[in-house]
Image (cartoon, helix red, strand yellow):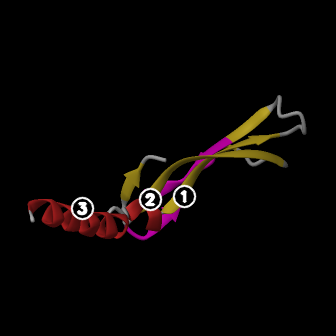
Amino acid sequence: MIKSIALALVATVAAVSPTAAMSPVQQGELMYERYYYDDEARTIQVGYERDTCNYYGVGGSRTEGRYGPYMDQYPIAYCDRGQLYPL
């Protein structure tokens, strides 16, 4: 009897866990930092930019330096209603 109750409890928890484990991160927007370059080999960096996070979502920040014709961008975090979450 106790064994069957324990098995039923484990089955219930296993069935509920995937939906209960969903975090706000899965609904957030991905944020990036961007590096701008003047040359295709990416040896002359001319600018840098990092996304910001506010209640309305991801926004752009002021560019340090300037934009260049070549860019590398890297994901840095998730933004969900003004809260940052790690990758």
Mark 3 vs mark 2: give the one in front.
3
Mark 1 — residue? 30
Give the camera-side residue of 15 and 67: 15
Mark 1 in CB contact with mark 2 (< 8 angstroms): yes
- Element carrying mark 2: strand
Who is closer to the viewer here, 67 or 8? 8
Q: Residue at x 75, y 49 (%)?
A: 67
Is tag 3's residue or tag 2's residue first in the polypeptide sequence? 3
Mark closer to the chain start, 1 or 2:
1
What residue did someone put label 3 on?
10
- Judge whether residue 54 can be spotted in this image: no
Cα distance between the residues tagged 1 and 3:
35 Å
Picture coordinates of residue 65, whole percent (x, y): 68, 41
- Residue 51, percent from left and from top: 54, 53
Q: Residue furthest left?
A: 2
In whole angstroms, how far apart are the C-alphas of marks 3 and 2?
A: 34 Å
Asked if the stretch drawn in magenta spans residue 77, the answer is no
The magenta stretch is 48-63
In this view, 78 is above or below 46: below
Q: Could you tell whether 55 is left or right of 69 in the image?
A: left
Q: Which residue is denoted by mark 2 in the rendering?
A: 79
Identify which residue, 16 or 57, lies in the foreground.
Answer: 16
